[in-house]
Amino acid sequence: MDKIAMQIRLLKIEELSYRDKTKLGEDLQEPVFVKLLLNILPDISRSIIELIVGVVYHTNSEDLLTYEIKSTFEIREMETVVCIRDYSVSVAPELLSILVGVSIGTLRGMLVLKSTDSFFCNYPLPIINITELIASLQTETVKQSSYFPFFRFRYE
């Protein structure tokens, strides 16, 4: 495997939305499913890539908690590792692994702080094998400007 040298800088992290319908100590009768969402927004002319990462905790009947953050990265010589073609974004797996790992780790920590008074205070995002996740993403087309659900699991 060839090594790729990249210069990456995290510029900022923004909280986009948070909504939680639950309360601490509440008892839910249905299984809770968790879906992670990803949106990749590159701007090659500015050498900027934004990752919007979201999580939705839901039952079969309703969304209970939704949370979205945006991580903005600066990538030097971005055109060598990111390609945009026909509204599809292709990102080198090595770069995508770093960006998604940082973004999910940030989401996990921010969610812990936000959900202290929620039913979900005891249900943090699990540790995710980023290598496997990136491998599964590489087999699918990630469309620009639309959320792509890329990981699902269930709490019972």
Image (cartoon, rainbow, N blue to C red):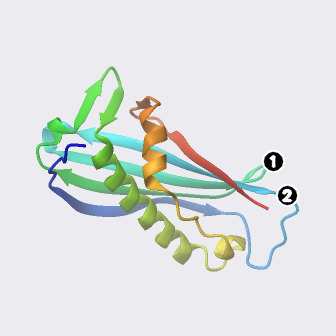
* Residue to which mark 1 is pinned: 61
Looking at the image, the residue that sits furthest to the top is 86
Q: Which structural element holds mark 2?
A: loop
The reply to whether discs 1 and 2 touch (Cβ–Cβ < 8 Å) is yes
Instruction: Where is residue 107? Give x, y as percent.
Output: 47, 64
Pick whichever, 124 or 87, lies toward us. Answer: 124
Judge by depth and name the residue closer to the eye, 79 or 21: 79
Q: Distance of mark 1 from mark 2, alpha carbons?
A: 9 Å
Residue located 24% across and 61% down the image: 10
Looking at the image, is 86 positioned above or below residue 77? Answer: above
- Above or below: residue 11 compared with residue 6: below
Q: Nearer the viewer, residue 138 or 121?
A: 138
Which of label 1 and label 2 is nearer to you? 2
State which quadrant residue 125 falls in: bottom right
Which percent across, then down, holds residue 73? 25, 54
Q: Residue 81 vs residue 142: left or right?
A: left
Q: Which residue is mark 2?
A: 30
Residue drawn 12% across the image and 49% down it: 76
